[in-house]
Amino acid sequence: MKLEGVELRRVAMPLVAPFRSASGVETTRDVLLLRVVTDQAEGWGECVAMAGPHYSSEYAEAAASVVRRFLIPAVAATPRLDAYAVAAALAPVKGHRMAKAALETAVLDAELRAEGRSFARELGAVRARVPCGVSIGILSSIGELIDAVGGYLDAGYLRIKLKIAPGWDVEPVRAVRERFGADVLLQVDANAAYAPADARQLARLDPYDLLLIEQPLAEDDLLGHAELAKRITTPVCLDESITSARTAATAIALGACAVVNVKPGRVGGYLEARRVHDVCAAHGLPVWCGGELETGLGRAANVALAALPGFTLPGDISASDRYFATDLTAPFVLEDGHLPVPAGPGLGVEPLAGVLDEVTTATEWLPL
Ligand code: OSB
Ligand code: MG
């Protein structure tokens, strides 16, 4: 495949409601999209970096900069480009996994579209639809939270995740359990907001039979998570800490997690995400597909990944209308608590030209 150029496109997508977590509040998704043009087909990659460096060190503007200055020149210099050559070409650049993931995804999309094969087929999907969970941000009152959870359960979501932080943890969990009962699949996500000294407070979640607690401690505190796991009964799941298949293997060996949230952007792309899945499967750990408020483009690839055999827990994969009044692609619509895995070539979805134009804030064409 020969790369002819890359378009960097920034879009601003208003969220249907502000999304607050321990790592900040998002009101608009300020997304970097990459469109690669090759001699055979075009491909799209959505960069999951947020507007600010609060969930991770990456942010959209920095991702655009590193793509422009370092990543595109590196892939441009690669003979016989295909998606599997991208990570090797980008290895001299440290970090910037979300930016790298976006570029690799766009190249993979182009390649698969040219070959008429889907992401699902390429990654090894074994399901035609995936079960959906929903991630609920920190709200201003328990009443508001109960209304939100009730609405999502009525819509058919199969699992509820509550964002927690010191001051908003045991009370919301207890309220949701009391109102909706023991059968609701319920989990929490702390986005690294706690310290090892908070173990006793986190143990107060033990009675509520949570599926897991996601990333209670700092990103680099694997030993802390291993110690915490001995002091609470809720299974520990890692998100921010897992940056590669290697860190997954290390975390598992240390006993730092019993479950892994797999996010392709965080680990540098879908090919590495599959390796994380494989490592976890080999150790008998369940995984689930995380999300970062993706548009339909990123969602399409996440749904394909979530259809792999080791993804045995519902993911943070929600319908388009949970995030946006109007999605960039034809909307993903919940059917019986599930989303269908796209089967068309590549991502299997296209940006809707009218919508794309409307939300675009900047474009830049980099010819090669
Ligand atoms: O920590 O899982 C997270 C969104 C943005 C960044 C980090 C996280 C999240 C979510 C929402 O929890 C998941 C989604 O529905 O896309
Ligand atoms: Mg998380």
Image (spheres, rainbow, N blue to C red):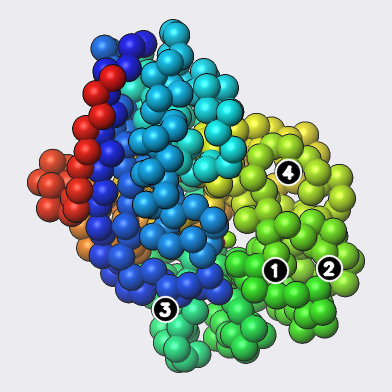
Q: Gap between marks 1 and 2, in whole Å?
A: 9 Å
Q: Nearer the viewer, mark 3 or mark 2?
A: 2
Q: Residues within 10 Å of mark 3 (few under 14, many from 20)?
A: some
Quadrant where ligand 2 appears:
bottom right
Is residue 318 among what the camera can see? no
How far across and how far down the image is residue 237, in percent? 70, 58
Q: Nearer the viewer, mark 3 or mark 4?
A: 4
Callout 1 touching callout 3 (CB < 8 Å): no
Above or below: residue 278 compared with residue 155: above
Q: Position of residue 122 (x, y in %)?
A: 49, 23
| Mark 1 beta carbon near ligand 2 (under 8 Å) | no
Q: Secondary structure at mark 2?
A: helix
- Name the spot of residue 189 as percent of width and height, x first: 61, 68
Q: CA distance from mark 3 to mark 4?
A: 33 Å
Which x, y percent locates residue 198? 78, 80
Q: Amino acid at mark 4?
A: Ala
Q: Residue at x 61, y 79 (%)?
A: 165
For badge 3, the amino acid type reads Ala
The amino acid at mark 1 is: Pro
Mark closest to the chain's N terminus, 1 or 2: 1
Mark 3 near ligand 1 (CB under 8 Å)?
Answer: no
Spatial CA span between label 3 and label 2: 30 Å
Tell whether label 2 touches label 1 (CB within 8 Å). yes
Measure the alpha-carbon separation of dots 1 and 3: 23 Å
Residue under label 3: 148
**Separation of disc 1 and disc 4 at Cα?**
16 Å
Q: Which residue is mark 4?
A: 248
**Residue beneath disc 2:** 228
Q: Which label was assigned to residue 252?
A: none
Please give the residue where the numbered disc 1 appears in the rendered image: 216
For mark 1, does the 10 Å Cα neighbourhood hold few (<14), some (14 to 19), or many (20 or more) residues?
Answer: many
> Who's the residue at 81% across and 73% down the image?
196
